[in-house]
């Protein structure tokens, strides 16, 4: 049986087979009369099981009513009306693109192995069609989703948005308890007046949440206060820390980056690496001897004249690696420019020491050290750079003290951008942040600097939105206590996944056009990993293929027309016009009758 199951039926036929499909119904659904054959039609069908085949479908009708045709229900379960590809191909493409993060070329090759011939453009179309089917199934299941939320005692609304360049903002609302994406929309901006209708839709469909969690944007804060006036409202701790860190460290970080860029030190050091790379590549034995010497604590005795070059090469690579230093959180938690500058200072100090060591009688052996010292002269003499680094180090110490108090995005942490913070009680975290606040306020030296006074103002401004007590709710199973998640990383993580997926198609090009073309309900694919959601959306069907086959094709066509018509798209003919030389003069002459 396993051998038979592994065989693709499509490989068994030299030509596409012809399959017969007849209606299961024998009597009219309106009057009960006998049905007669109206016509037989030949269709193309492409599925994973049989590849490409011909479907000969018999169409029946009632001669009495003469107003309704009856086709094969079996064929309707295999593929959408007027479509070639079966529901199994549609679901395969959706899962491959949105779950396995495959690009169109990979999907095309995999389907080709299964005797399914398809173009990359058709794959992108099916991927959008998959989202439309999922979106319609989601809307048809909203009552059952609300029932699930009610069984949990309600929901905590996490709000987040993403955009690229001038693209619309893709905003999502997610329940922090069940982790189900509830609603999505595209907004022209994150102003309150554009967000309010979205929140009202969520409120009408799922009721009032017992808490909301979001970032510090003024528009979203204002919109939440308008629609959910009496709902506990909390700020995402990660966004809060990132905002404070950028305000505190941003100016110095920019100064350090600009000064390093002006000196061009990174390019200079990379040039040195290229100059000395041959010595390392042509002397693997010496490289291994140096590695062993570092581990064992003594220098190798061989090829002493080459060791300074190899040593300089290694130290410069170490200095350049400082720009990669960090824990994957991004700025302001990671400070690559400050780390790079600190390594350059240490490099200068250590090379100065090494330049005084003579391993042979030839002064030329230490030439690489002299070269590095010359390269670093301007960096070491830059008083503005030195001052910015000193100021930033002081501020980093204060900022890291706040990170420690909040137990989030800690130095040395392994969670990176997905870090959700420690699972301590909110009261414990609040006590530590209170102690940090009091320490900062009582330090006379720090209080004399505006940046720290502003930090205290930010803390006090958002204090009530940072620390929430556990929420007690009533459920059909009894009373439960829920602690809202203190970050929005659930959606942030998914947004990063989406962007990575689309970058596999577009490379390093900006994603603005991609975000414009993206269907607003694309984040719903995140729900397919949730067993409770899948149980609801399948509606007692064993698979998505069978669930999608139940949806009225007229609804799908209407939705597809809507999502495939992008108002931002410039007509091709207009694009031709705007490239014409002297277009404004031509248009004026045309409309004034001067042509």
Image (cartoon, rainbow, N blue to C red):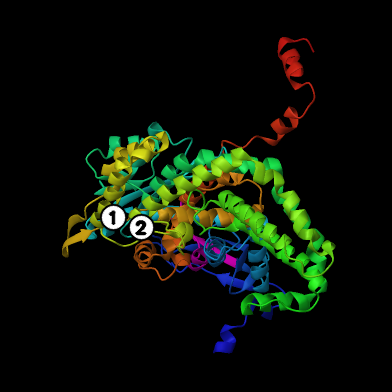
Q: How much space separates mark 2 and mark 1, taking CA atoms? A: 7 Å
Q: Is residue 161 left or right of residue 484?
A: right
Let me know if residue 172 appears in the view.
no
Report the front residue among 570 and 157.
Answer: 157
Let me know if residue 373 appears in the view.
yes
Q: Position of residue 562 (x, y in %)?
A: 51, 42
Mark 2 vs 1, N-terminal side: 2
Q: Residue, x 55% and y 88% (percent of image)?
A: 2
Q: Is residue 326 left or right of residue 120?
A: left
On whether residue 507 falls in the magenta region, the answer is: no
Q: Residue, x 24% and y 49% (percent of image)?
A: 210
Q: Position of residue 176 (x, y in %)?
A: 33, 56
Report the front residue among 593 and 566.
Answer: 566
Q: Position of residue 368 (x, y in %)?
A: 78, 59
Report how many numbered discs are placed on residues in the image. 2
Q: Is residue 391 above or below residue 127?
A: above
What is the secondary structure assignment of the residue under circle 1? helix
User: Which stretch appears magenta?
Assistant: 56-79
Q: Position of residue 386 (x, y in %)?
A: 58, 43
Report the front residue among 555 and 463.
Answer: 463
Identify the residue position indicated by label 2 in the image.
407
Identify the residue position indicated by label 1 in the image.
429
């Amino acid at each position: 049986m396993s051998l038979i199951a592994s065989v693709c039926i499509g490989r068994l036929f030299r030509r596409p087979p012809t399959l017969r499909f007849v209606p299961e119904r024998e009597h009219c659904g309106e009057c009960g009369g006998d049905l007669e054959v109206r016509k037989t039609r030949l269709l193309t069908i492409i599925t994973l099981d049989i590849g490409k085949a011909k479907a000969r479908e018999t169409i029946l009708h009632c001669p009495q009513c003469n107003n309704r045709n009856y086709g094969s229900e079996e064929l309707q379960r295999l593929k959408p009306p007027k479509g070639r590809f079966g529901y199994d191909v549609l679901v395969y493409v959706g899962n491959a693109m949105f779950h396995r993060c495959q690009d169109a070329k990979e999907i095309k090759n995999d389907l080709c192995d299964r005797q399914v011939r398809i173009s990359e453009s058709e794959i992108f179309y099916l991927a959008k069609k998959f989202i439309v089917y999922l979106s319609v199934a989601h809307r048809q299941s909203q009552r059952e989703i609300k029932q699930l939320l009610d069984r949990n005692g309600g929901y905590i609304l996490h709000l987040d948005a993403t955009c690229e360049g001038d693209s619309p903002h893709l905003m999502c609302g997610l329940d922090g308890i069940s982790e189900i994406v509830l609603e999505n929309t595209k907004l022209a901006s994150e102003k309150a007046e554009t967000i309010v209708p979205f929140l009202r839709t969520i409120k009408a469909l799922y009721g009032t949440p017992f808490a909301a969690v979001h970032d510090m944007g003024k528009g979203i804060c204002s919109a939440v206060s308008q629609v959910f006036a009496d709902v506990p409202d909390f700020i995402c701790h990660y966004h809060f820390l990132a905002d404070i860190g950028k305000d505190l460290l941003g100016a110095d970080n920019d100064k350090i980056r600009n000064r390093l860029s002006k000196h061009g030190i990174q390019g200079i050091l990379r040039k040195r690496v290229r100059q000395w790379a041959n010595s390392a590549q042509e002397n693997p034995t010496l490289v291994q001897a140096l590695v062993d010497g570092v581990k064992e604590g003594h220098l190798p005795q061989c090829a002493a004249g080459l060791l300074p070059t190899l040593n300089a090469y290694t130290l410069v690579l170490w200095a350049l690696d400082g720009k990669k230093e960090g824990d994957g959180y991004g700025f302001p938690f990671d400070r690559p420019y400050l780390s790079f500058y600190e390594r350059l200072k240490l490099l200068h100090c250590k090379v100065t020491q090494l330049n005084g060591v003579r391993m042979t009688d030839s002064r030329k052996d230490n030439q690489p050290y002299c070269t590095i010292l010359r390269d670093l002269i301007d960096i070491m003499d830059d008083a503005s750079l030195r001052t910015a680094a000193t100021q930033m180090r002081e501020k980093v110490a204060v900022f890291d003290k706040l990170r420690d108090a909040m137990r989030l995005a800690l130095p040395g942490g392994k969670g990176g951008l997905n870090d959700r913070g420690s699972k301590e009680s909110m009261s414990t975290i609040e006590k530590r942040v209170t102690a940090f606040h009091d320490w900062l306020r009582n330090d006379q030296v720090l209080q004399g600097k505006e940046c720290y006074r502003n930090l205290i103002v930010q803390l006090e401004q958002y204090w009530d939105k940072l620390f929430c007590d556990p929420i007690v709710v009533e459920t059909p199973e009894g009373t439960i206590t829920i602690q809202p998640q203190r970050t929005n990383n659930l959606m942030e993580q998914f947004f990063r996944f989406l962007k990575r997926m689309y970058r596999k198609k577009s490379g390093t090009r900006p994603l603005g056009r991609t975000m414009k073309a993206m269907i607003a309900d694309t984040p719903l694919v995140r729900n397919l990993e949730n067993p409770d959601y899948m149980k609801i959306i399948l509606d007692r069907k064993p698979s998505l293929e069978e669930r999608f086959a139940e949806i009225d094709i007229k609804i799908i066509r209407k939705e597809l027309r809507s999502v495939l018509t992008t108002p931002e798209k410039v007509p091709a003919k207009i694009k031709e016009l705007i490239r014409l030389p002297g277009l404004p003069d031509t248009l004026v002459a045309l409309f004034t009758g001067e042509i």
